Image (cartoon, helix red, strand yellow):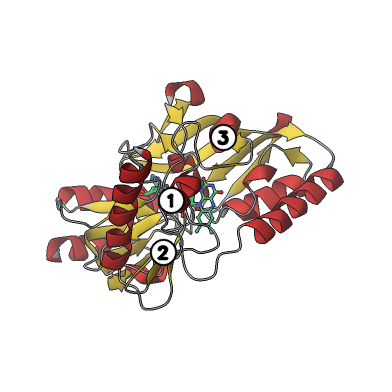
Amino acid sequence: MQGLLEDLKNGFRGELLEQEPLSAHTSWKLGGPADLFLVPQNQADLQYALRVIKKNQQSWLVIGNGSNLLVSDTGFAGVVIQLGQLAKIAFLPGGKVEVESGVQLGHLIKLCCRKGLGGLEELSGIPGMVGGALLMNAGAIDTEIASLVSQVYLTAGQDEWALRCDQIDFEYRHSGLDGLGVITRALLQLKEDDPKELEERRLKILARRKEVQKVSGAHAGSVFKNPTGEKAWQLIDKAGLRGRRIGKAEVSTEHCNHIVNMGGASSADVLALIEEVQQAVLRTSRRQLELEVRLVGWKD
Ligand SMILES: Cc1cc2nc3c(=O)[nH]c(=O)nc-3n(C[C@H](O)[C@H](O)[C@H](O)COP(=O)(O)OP(=O)(O)OC[C@H]3O[C@@H](n4cnc5c(N)ncnc54)[C@H](O)[C@@H]3O)c2cc1C
């Protein structure tokens, strides 16, 4: 780690924090420290960081808003890179939008609606950055972000490369972008539409979400993917686990595919509850619930 720190101090221009608690960067408000936490200023800075991390053979992980992550209480042994400063958006002719991966999805949708570019509105209220949304193929109502993607750009430390949408295996809450490198930006194809109508639709979707997805406490949205043809929350409810608690982690009484940090939960509490839910649903409905949230920093 010492060699890496020296290399970073020589050429990295962004923010560099040591032993940064990841609980400050996850929607669950959980997770121990990362040895190093980097916020690159721009793409060149990101590429420099990736090169020296590789040279020093350190583990690394890129995150967005941490709204889909369960980080262990011991944290991440290595470097966490957060891309919030890669936040440029360019509106191009023909309804195309080039967007960097650190742009907040909600901000992008708002700007697009105001410019009369439709397609993304149904994703309003998903609290991720564009990079996280692409990696997870985030979706809501009848839209998945994949349906609007023309190209995705990645880097592994050298020059960027591009993948067309048809070269990426997008599935329900999954993309073939996993493990390829860091998503730096994307080219989206939107549809020209009336700005006033789009804005009204966006606000309606946000209001509806507030109404039906009222969950008190810190959480990470849906913990489990819906098995084909079924709803994970119904299977959990049927297993009698609504309101089940381990420590300060609770299966939400309002939406039982959410697990809530009631204040003072540990990541171990949440993981124990996840495992209990999986076992109970297997017992009662013979369904293996697959995780939608990503586990970070857990030993096998
Ligand atoms: C209140 C709430 C509501 C939610 N509602 C929805 C919903 O309706 N639909 C839905 O699909 N999801 C939902 N989610 C889950 C989550 O917001 C989405 O999965 C979101 O897209 C994650 O984005 P993020 O920036 O937080 O990614 P993170 O959680 O930070 O990361 C997710 C994964 O992406 C990887 N990653 C992030 N950025 C990059 C990058 N630039 N390059 C390569 N890999 C990257 C990370 O390593 C990690 O594996 C919800 C979450 C919450 C808390």
Disc 1 versus disc 3: distance between alpha carbons? 38 Å
User: Residue 293 location, x and y as percent?
Assistant: 39, 50
In the image, is residue 145 above or below residue 6?
above
Q: Which residue is mark 1?
A: 236
* Residue depicted at 33% across the width and 39% down the height: 288
Callout 1, which amino acid?
A: Ile
Disc 2 versus disc 3: distance between alpha carbons? 27 Å
- Mark 2 or mark 3, earlier in chain: 2
* Residue depicted at 24% across the width and 65% down the height: 75
Q: Which residue is mark 2?
A: 26
- Mark 2 or mark 1, earlier in chain: 2
The reply to whether residue 101 is visible in this rendering is no
Q: In the figure, is residue 272 to the left or right of 58?
A: right
Mark 2, secondary structure of its residue: loop
Point out the frontmost of discs 2 and 3: 2
Q: Which residue is mark 3?
A: 187
Callout 2, which amino acid?
A: Thr
Point out the frontmost of discs 2 and 1: 1
Which part of the image, by quadrant, shows the N terminus? bottom left
Q: Is mark 2 within 8 Å of ligand 1?
A: yes
Callout 3, which amino acid?
A: Leu
